[in-house]
Image: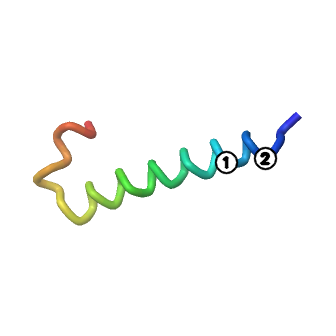
C-alpha cells in the first residue's frame, strides 16, 4: 500500500517540520508566523 511516493511524502513532511523547528530554535524572534 505504501509505495515510493508515500515514502517521499513522509520524508518531505519530516524535512519541512525539521526546517520549521530549526527556524524557531535559531531565530525565535521570527517564529510568529509558524505559530
* Numbered disc 2: secondary structure: helix
Count of number-bearing discs: 2
Q: Which residue sits furthest right?
A: 1
Residue drawn where x is 50% and y is 54% of the image: 15
Relative image position of residue 20 (x, y in whole percent): 35, 51
Nearer to us in this view, 2 or 24: 2
Q: Which residue sits furthest bottom?
A: 26
Q: Is residue 34 left or right of residue 16?
A: left
Q: Is residue 2 left or right of residue 34?
A: right
Q: Is residue 32 left or right of residue 7?
A: left
Relative image position of residue 28 (x, y in whole percent): 17, 56
Q: Which mark is residue 8?
A: 1
Residue drawn where x is 27% and y is 57% of the image: 23
Relative image position of residue 32 (x, y in whole percent): 16, 40
Locate residue 3: give its quadrant: top right
Cβ atoms at labels 1 and 2 below 8 Å apart: yes
**In the depicted structure, whether residue 16 falls above or below residue 23:** above
Residue drawn where x is 20% and y is 47% of the image: 31
Q: Which residue is mark 2?
A: 4
* Numbered disc 1: secondary structure: helix
**In the depicted structure, whether residue 31 falls above or below residue 35:** below
* Inter-mark Cα distance, 1 to 2: 6 Å
User: How is this picture coloured?
Assistant: rainbow
**In the depicted structure, whether residue 4 falls above or below residue 33:** below
Nearer to us in this view, 2 or 26: 2
Q: Which residue sits furthest front?
A: 5
Relative image position of residue 35 (x, y in whole percent): 26, 36
**In the depicted structure, whether residue 1 falls above or below residue 19:** above
Amino acid at each position: 500500500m505504501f509505495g515510493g511516493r508515500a515514502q517521499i511524502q513522509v520524508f518531505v513532511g519530516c524535512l519541512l517540520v525539521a526546517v520549521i523547528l530549526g527556524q524557531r530554535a535559531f531565530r525565535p524572534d521570527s517564529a510568529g508566523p509558524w505559530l
